[in-house]
């Protein structure tokens, strides 16, 4: 579903934020992307969803290069950034309808999915209010719903559990599992290692822009906890 | 006190991409900023030269009647009016629309100091206008009067205090508007209506004043009396600078500083209440799912952009004032003949020029109403939504152009009909009167998008930075100005050639320019948008 081939990203001044990254995420995968602050997780995620331009390597979604046909890639991808800055001058429902229009979601689908996810996250009653009146968690829920209404093949999330209440976090995990059972793939970054350990079937650990380990969660952590493995790998030069 | 300066410095550094210019290591970026600095410098020199010429011409008249002090009095009044007029627009935005409100207000700093830093930001920007008007006037005065050293000392010191009172007066009105608006549900709309009302009232007042100035222009003492009566601070200023009266000098400074201090303290007490009133949304939280309306991506983007436009009173005020002025002029011309208007503004052949240049005059108002030059910057931190959406970027850019045309075209058509009636234009002139401004409307909207793509500012904390103090807005304004000055000059210089023919040529050239920009947006727009 997602293939990252020799992806590198240099920032102005020559410093490499990500160096020769290779990853393959298959349909049905919940792929956790773990690393320190500044390790290159967000840079990778932003390149995958076509927000960040890059020169070296290639990224393919469902066999389509994001460089060659970004619009086709984006049409099957959904992205939720770590800090969902949404259009505060729109109401929740206006925003969802706007996203529905951009992703050409049919009227029937968008109505039923908005209703379903709105009720799941207990936010439907607030859809008529301006986003500027929403709390951080409500904005996060709205961003999640907007990502789900076009039934993405690839869901990319940057620190998705930050700001969510326990019930919403549980709901998101259930939705993620449902999506993958239907053949979609999920690629997400997190600092919450417990969640990654329980939720992900595959894990990649990145340090200073370089991939230091990746594979099935059981293989990466072995008999240890993911936390111990992560700390050992990160501290070891 | 040091905190006021610290806060002011932080805000000013974010203006005009100043901080970026100081810290960027990117050669391309540096080259672009250098180019921008040169453009700004050229504009400053151009304005300075015009201002000097204006002062010099006036000085010739005042020299004859032996009242050179009137030059400084009038120019001080002009600087004050400019300061007042330009501050009303942005006072509310600078004071109450900053995203770092929570951060700033949680710091161990007095609220009055936060207010002071905001007013000082307005002050620094207005000091520029004051210098542009007063420096050439001061030089002309010195050339003509040859005053002693004391003049320079008093003149330069008072320069720094001239903008204070006009800014405070405008900020009081801006704050009052915000305070009243904050009590209503649709605070932004109320604020917009009230600000427009005040601006139109001020314009009407100054129009009436112009008429009186004209009548009194030959009578030096009466003119002085009138200016001194309208704005008493000019009298104190003239006494201080021209007559070296230390009492007046001190009084001028004390009044300015005291007004500033008093205002910041008083507003400081109501600041949080006003901000909370403006920013608190009315949430009913009773929404029930209704049938939704599906639209094409372009229409969805257009609606979103239009909602964004209407949601910001600062954005509307700054970009629609040109069209409001055009409508006001078109309506006025129904009641005042162009010959009379020519007599009133002392341009003897105005009616002839107007019949020749009307399409360009109307185009001038249209280019003043460029919403696109800040429309990409205004996406700010929301840019990820558009960048990650499966829509060709040219569709996004075209939706922004469409909103600009929505602002300009309807008023343009109404004004066209009114002008056609009042100017009694022939059929070719009528056609040009409609076609040329229409072409300029398309040109201005597309050029704004292009300039904003080249000079984006997505890191703003206050909308004012994107709408009024960003490089893209200045560059777009300058390009718009140049695009009109050249045709104006051509029509005036080639007076022996048929004016309609020249206008037709200009129209064809502008169509060619528009198609080049359109093609560029279609081919390179995607790439430029992606690098944002």
Image (spheres, rainbow, N blue to C red):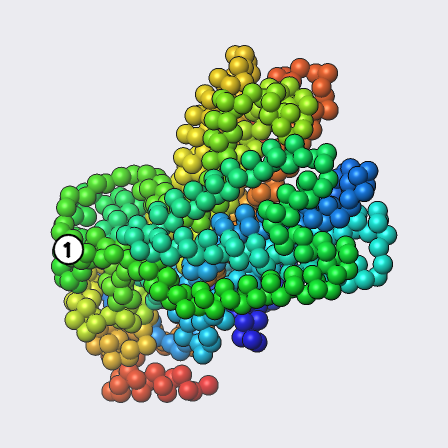
| Residue drawn at the location 73% of the way across and 16% of the way down | B496
Instruction: Depth check: give the residue in front, B17 or A64.
Output: B17
Bin the neighbour count of mark 1 within 10 Å (Cα to Cα): few under 14, some 14-19, many 20 and up: few
Residue B248 pos. (x, y %): 69, 61
Residue A68 pos. (x, y %): 42, 49
| Residue drawn at the location 23% of the way across and 40% of the way down | B294
Question: In the rendered structure, the residue with mark 1 lies on which chain?
Answer: B
Instruction: Depth check: give the residue in front, A116 or B167.
Output: B167
Residue B108 pos. (x, y %): 45, 79
| Residue drawn at the location 59% of the way across and 25% of the way down | B341
Residue A183 pos. (x, y %): 20, 58
Q: Which residue is mark 1?
A: B286
Against A108, residue B26 (above or below) is: below
When asked about the image quadrant of residue B350, the answer is top right
User: Quarter holding the N terminus of chain B?
Assistant: bottom right
Instruction: Depth check: give the residue in front, B112 or A74.
Output: B112
């Amino acid at each position: 579903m997602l293939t990252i081939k020799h992806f590198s990203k240099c920032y102005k001044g020559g410093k490499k934020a990500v160096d020769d990254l290779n990853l393959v995420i298959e349909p049905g995968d919940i792929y956790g992307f773990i690393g320190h602050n500044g390790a290159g997780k967000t840079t990778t995620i932003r390149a995958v969803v076509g927000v960040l331009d890059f020169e070296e390597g290639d990224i393919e979604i469902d066999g389509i290069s994001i460089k060659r046909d970004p619009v086709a890639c984006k049409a099957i991808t959904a992205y939720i950034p770590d800090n969902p800055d949404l259009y505060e001058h729109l109401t929740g429902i206006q925003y969802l309808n706007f996203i529905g229009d951009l992703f050409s979601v049919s009227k029937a689908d968008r109505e039923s999915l908005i209703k379903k996810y709105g009720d799941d996250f207990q936010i439907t009653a607030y859809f008529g209010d301006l986003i500027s009146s929403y709390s951080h968690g409500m904005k996060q829920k709205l961003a999640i719903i907007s990502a789900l209404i076009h039934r993405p093949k690839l869901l990319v999330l940057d620190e998705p559990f930050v700001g969510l209440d326990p019930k919403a976090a549980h709901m998101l995990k259930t939705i993620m599992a449902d999506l993958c059972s239907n053949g979609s793939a999920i690629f997400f970054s997190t600092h919450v290692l417990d969640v990654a350990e329980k939720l992900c079937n595959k894990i990649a650990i990145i340090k200073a822009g370089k991939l230091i380990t990746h594979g099935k969660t059981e293989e990466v952590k072995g008999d240890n906890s993911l936390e111990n493995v992560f700390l050992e790998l990160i501290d070891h030069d | 006190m040091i905190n006021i300066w610290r806060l002011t410095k932080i805000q000013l550094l974010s203006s005009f991409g100043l901080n970026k210019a100081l810290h960027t290591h990117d050669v391309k970026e540096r080259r672009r900023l250098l180019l921008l600095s040169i453009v700004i410098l050229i504009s400053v020199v151009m304005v300075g030269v015009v201002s000097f010429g204006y002062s010099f011409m006036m000085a010739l008249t005042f020299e004859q009647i032996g009242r050179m002090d009137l030059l400084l009095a009038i120019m001080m009044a002009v600087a004050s009016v400019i300061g007042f007029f330009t501050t009303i627009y942005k006072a509310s935005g600078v004071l109450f629309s900053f995203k770092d409100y929570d951060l700033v207000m949680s710091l161990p700093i007095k609220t009055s100091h936060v207010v002071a830093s905001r007013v000082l930001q307005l002050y620094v920007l207005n000091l520029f206008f004051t210098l542009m008007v007063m420096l050439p006037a001061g030089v002309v005065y010195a050339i003509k009067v040859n005053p002693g050293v004391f003049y320079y000392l008093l003149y330069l010191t008072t320069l720094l205090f001239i903008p204070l009172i006009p800014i405070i007066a405008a900020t009081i009105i801006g704050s009052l508007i915000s305070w009243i608006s904050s009590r209503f549900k649709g605070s932004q709309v109320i604020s917009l209506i009230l600000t427009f009302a005040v601006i139109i009232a001020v314009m009407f007042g100054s129009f009436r004043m112009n008429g009186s100035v004209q009548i009194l222009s030959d009578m030096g003492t009466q003119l002085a009396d009138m200016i001194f009566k309208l704005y008493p601070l000019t009298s104190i200023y003239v006494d201080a600078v021209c007559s070296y009266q230390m009492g007046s000098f001190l009084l001028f400074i004390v009044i300015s500083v005291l007004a500033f201090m008093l205002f910041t303290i008083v507003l400081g007490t109501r600041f949080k209440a006003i901000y909370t009133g403006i920013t608190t949304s009315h949430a009913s939280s009773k929404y029930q799912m209704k049938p939704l309306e599906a639209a094409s991506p372009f229409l969805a983007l257009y609606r979103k952009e239009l909602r964004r436009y209407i949601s910001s009173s600062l954005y509307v005020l700054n970009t629609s004032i040109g069209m409001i002025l055009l409508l006001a002029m078109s309506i006025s011309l129904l009641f005042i003949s162009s010959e009379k208007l020519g007599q009133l503004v002392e341009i003897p052949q105005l009616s002839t020029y107007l019949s020749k240049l009307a399409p360009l005059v109307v185009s001038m108002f249209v280019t003043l109403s460029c919403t696109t030059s800040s429309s990409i910057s205004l996406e700010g931190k929301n840019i990820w939504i558009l960048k990650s959406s499966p829509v060709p970027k040219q569709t996004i850019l075209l939706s922004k152009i469409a909103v600009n045309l929505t602002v300009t075209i309807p008023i343009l058509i109404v004004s066209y009909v009114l002008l056609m009636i009042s100017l009694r234009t022939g059929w070719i002139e009528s056609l040009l009167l409609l076609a040329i401004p229409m072409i300029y409307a398309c040109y201005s909207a597309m050029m704004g998008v292009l300039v904003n793509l080249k000079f984006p500012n997505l890191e703003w904390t206050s909308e004012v930075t994107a709408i009024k103090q960003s490089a893209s807005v200045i560059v777009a304004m300058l390009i718009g100005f140049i695009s009109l000055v050249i045709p104006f000059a051509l029509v005036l210089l080639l007076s022996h050639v048929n004016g309609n023919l020249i206008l037709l040529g200009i129209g064809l050239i502008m169509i060619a320019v528009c198609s080049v920009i359109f093609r560029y947006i279609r081919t390179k727009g995607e790439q430029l948008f992606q690098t944002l």
